[in-house]
Image (spheres, rainbow, N blue to C red):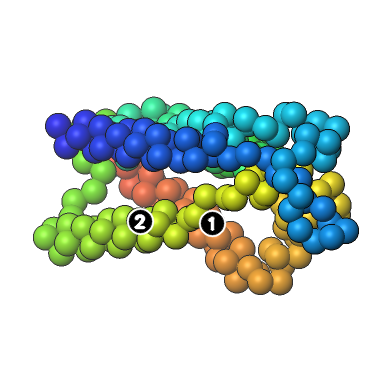
C-alpha cells in the first residue's frame, strides 16, 4: 500500500509540474537578437534558416523532458520496490536510459552515449554477474535494520526531498529571447564534449573518480566474500 501511494504521489507531482511549465514555454514567442546592436529587435522569422522549427517547440520539449524524467524516477522506484533482483536491474536500465535521453536534450551527446554504453551496458552486466554469484532467494530479506537505522533513513529521505524542493523552486523559466536563440555550433571545448569532460574529470573531479573506482572494487570483492560462505554451507549440508 505504501509503495502504491508513493508511486501515485510521484506521478501526480510530475503531471502537476508539466501542467505548470508547459503553458509558459508554449506561450513564449521567439525574439531575434541583433548581436551587432546588442539588443532584441522583436519577433523575426529570418534570424535563422530553420527558425520556424524553434517556434512552438517549447511545449514539445517540456513534454519530452517530463516523460524522460518520469521514466527515470519510475525506474528508480521500480528498483527499490522489487524483490526480484533481475527485475530491479531492468528497472535501473530504464532509469539510466531516461538520464541518457535528458543528456541528449541538453546537447551533451558524448555524456548521453557514455551513459548508455557504460552504465546501461557494462555496469548492468556487472550487476547481473554479482546477482548470479550471490544466488539470493527472493523471500530472504535484503537487510535488517533497527530503530536507529530507520531514523537515519528517514532523515536522509527528508534531506533529499528538501534539497530537491529547493532546487525546483530555484529554477526560473527561460525568457522568449533565450528560448528562441539557436544554440551555437559545437566546438572542441563545448560543454558535454569529450575534451571538456576529460578536463573536468582529471582536474576538478580526480578524487571522486578514484573513489568510485575503489568503491566498485570493494563491491566486487564484497560480493565474492558474501557468496563464498553460502557455497561452503551448502557443501557441508550436502555432505
Q: Name which residue lies at 51% across and 31% down.
A: 63
Q: Which residue in the protein does label 1 denote?
A: 217
- Relative to residue 54, is residue 198 depicted above or below? below
Q: Does 45 sit left or right of 214 as displayed?
A: right
Q: Which residue in the protein does label 2 denote?
A: 165
Percent of width and height locating residue 137: 28, 32
Q: Outermost residue toward the left?
A: 147
Mark 2, secondary structure of its residue: helix
Q: Name which residue lies at 81% across and 31% down.
A: 50
| Screen quadrant of the N terminus | top left
Q: Nearer the viewer, residue 105 or 150?
A: 105
Q: Name which residue lies at 61% across and 63% down.
A: 209
Percent of width and height locating residue 106: 65, 45
Q: Does 72 sit left or right of 10 as displayed?
A: right
Residue 191 visible from this viewpoint: yes
Percent of width and height locating residue 56: 62, 30
- Relative to residue 197, is residue 21 depicted above or below? above
Task: Answer few, some or many: residues within 10 Å of disc 2's Cα (few below 14, many 20 plus, some between 14 and 19).
Answer: few
Q: Does 113 sit left or right of 81 as displayed?
A: right
In this rendering, the label closer to the viewer, 1 or 2: 2
Mark 1, secondary structure of its residue: helix
Amino acid at each position: 500500500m505504501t509503495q502504491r501511494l508513493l508511486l501515485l504521489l510521484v506521478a501526480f507531482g510530475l503531471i502537476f509540474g508539466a501542467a505548470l511549465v508547459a503553458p509558459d514555454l508554449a506561450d513564449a514567442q521567439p525574439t531575434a537578437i541583433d548581436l551587432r546592436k546588442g539588443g532584441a529587435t522583436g519577433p523575426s522569422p529570418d534570424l535563422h534558416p530553420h527558425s520556424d522549427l524553434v517556434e512552438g517547440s517549447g511545449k514539445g520539449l517540456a513534454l519530452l523532458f517530463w516523460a524522460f524524467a518520469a521514466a527515470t524516477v519510475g525506474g528508480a522506484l521500480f528498483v527499490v520496490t522489487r524483490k526480484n533482483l533481475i527485475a530491479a536491474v531492468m528497472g535501473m536500465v530504464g532509469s539510466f536510459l531516461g538520464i541518457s535521453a535528458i543528456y541528449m536534450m541538453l546537447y551533451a551527446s558524448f555524456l548521453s552515449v557514455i551513459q548508455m554504453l557504460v552504465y546501461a551496458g557494462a555496469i548492468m552486466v556487472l550487476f547481473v554477474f554479482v546477482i548470479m554469484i550471490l544466488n539470493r532467494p527472493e523471500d530472504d530479506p535484503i537487510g535488517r535494520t533497527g530503530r536507529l537505522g530507520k531514523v537515519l533513513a528517514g532523515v536522509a529521505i527528508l534531506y533529499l526531498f528538501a534539497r530537491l524542493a529547493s532546487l525546483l523552486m530555484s529554477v526560473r523559466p527561460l525568457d522568449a529571447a533565450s528560448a528562441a536563440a539557436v544554440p551555437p555550433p559545437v566546438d572542441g571545448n563545448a560543454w558535454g564534449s569529450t575534451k571538456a569532460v576529460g578536463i573536468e574529470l582529471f582536474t576538478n573531479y580526480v578524487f571522486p573518480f578514484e573513489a568510485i573506482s575503489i568503491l566498485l572494487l570493494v563491491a566486487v570483492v564484497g560480493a565474492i566474500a558474501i557468496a563464498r560462505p553460502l557455497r561452503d554451507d551448502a557443501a557441508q549440508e550436502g555432505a
